[in-house]
Image: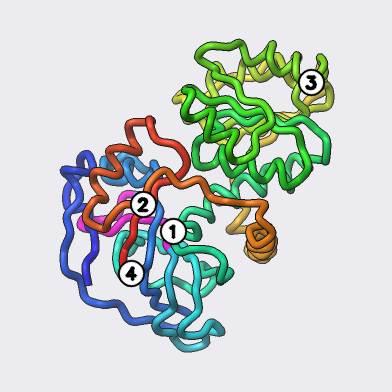
Amino acid sequence: MKSWFVTSIGDPNEALEIREAKRPRPGKGEVVIGVKAFALNFFDILQCQGKYQERPQLPFTPGAEVAGVIEEVGEGVSLTVGQRVLALPLLPNGGFTQAVVVKEEDVFPISEELSYEEAAVMFITYHTAFYALHSKAKLQPYETLLVHAGSGGVGSAAIQIGKALGAKVIATAGSAEKLEMCTEIGADVVINYREENFIQKVKDVSAGHGADVIFDPVGGDVFQQSRKCIAFDGRLLLIGFAGGTIPDAPMNHALIKNYSLVGVHFGYFRKLFPEKVRDAHNELMEWFKEGKLKPLIYHSYAFEEVPDALIQLGSRKTWGKLVVRASK
C-alpha cells in the first residue's frame, strides 16, 4: 500500500514523500481501516514544518481524520469487519495512507447516507461547533448567533449547527465568494468584514440587542470588536486564534455588560468525557440524515495531490474543508 511520510522538515511540497508501506495488523483493542478518504487540516502543515506541539521522529505519517471500511479487527473489539466508519488515527501512524490501525475508542460508525468524503471532514469541526454551541453556550431557539470566519471548516459547521438549534445566524467572511458559501449553508445575514463594520451591522439586524452568542475562531482584533456588539448576558466563545494574536480581555467590560467569556477546548473535553462525545456523534449523524447538516467541501483531491492541496489550504484562500480520496 501507499502512504505519505514527512521525511524532512519544511513546507509540504518539500517535506512529504509517498512511499510503499507494509499493511498494518491490529493489536488488542484495535481495528484496521481501509481508508477511502481523509481530511486535511492546517495543523498538518505545521507538522510538516516542525511547528506543531507534537514532533514525532522522522519519518512519520500525518493525518488526523479518515473515513473508510473496517477490514480487520483485533482481540476484544466489538466493531465488525465491513462497517463504514470515521476514525481519528494518532501520530506517528496518521491517516495520509490507504490503510491505518486505530484504537476502537477512536472509531465511530457512520450512516449509510454519509459519503466517505463527507465523513472524513466531519469530526473535528462539527464536534467542536456542537460542543461550543450546544454544551457550552446552550444556544436557544430565536437567539442571535454571530459566527466569524463563517466559510471556514469550523465556522461553516457552526452556521449549520446554529440553524439546527433554531438560532438566527449572522456570519462574517472576507470575500463575495465566501459570503455566498455562508448563505448557501444557511446563514440568515452575511457581512464582508473587509468592507463593512460588523459591529453596527449586528446591532442593526438585531434591533440594537446585539449577538447573544459569538463564535470566534479568529481572536485578535475580531475579539475586541466582538465585545462591542455582544448582547447583555451574552456568551463569547473562544474557539481559537487563527488571526495570530491572543487578545487581552478587560474584565470590567464583561462585568458591565454581564457577558461570559467561554473557553472551548474540545480535544480536552473528548479525553475527559468520551461517552458524551459518542452521544454527540450519534446526534450529529441523525441531524445529517434529517438534512440539517451538509459538510462544506472546497475540493476533493487525488491521493497524489496532497502537497499541492496543503499549499492551497495554507494560502487561506480556500473555504470549507479539503478532502483527499485515498482509494475507490
Q: Percent x, y for residue 253?
A: 75, 15
- Asked if disc 1 and disc 2 are in contact, CB closer than 8 Å, the reply is yes
Which mark, by number, is residue 328? 4
The residue beneath circle 3 is 206
Reading the chain from its start, which is encountered first: label 4 or label 2? 2
Which image quadrant: the N terminus?
Answer: bottom left
Q: What residue type is labelled 3?
A: Ser
Instruction: Tell me how far mark 4 sits from mark 2, CA to CA.
Output: 13 Å
Q: Percent x, y for residue 242?
A: 47, 30
Reading the chain from its start, which is encountered first: label 4 or label 1? 1
- Asked if disc 4 and disc 1 are in contact, CB closer than 8 Å, the reply is no
Instruction: Tell me how far mark 1 sits from mark 2, CA to CA.
Output: 8 Å
Secondary structure found at label 2:
strand
Q: Can residue 103 be seen in this view?
A: yes
Q: What residue type is labelled 2?
A: Ser
Which image quadrant: the C terminus?
Answer: bottom left
Secondary structure found at label 3:
loop
Instruction: Tell me how far mark 2 sits from mark 3, CA to CA.
Output: 38 Å
* Residue drawn at x 50%, y 60% as measured from the top left: 119
Q: What stretch is highlighted in magenta?
A: 55-66
* Residue drawn at x 69%, y 11% as measured from the top left: 200
The residue beneath circle 2 is 300
**Magenta span includes 65:** yes
Q: Percent x, y for residue 218?
A: 53, 28
Image vertical order of residue 86 relative to residue 144, above or below = below
Q: How is the image coloured?
A: rainbow
Q: Which of 70 and 191 is in front in this view?
A: 191
Mark 4 or mark 3, which is nearer to you? 4
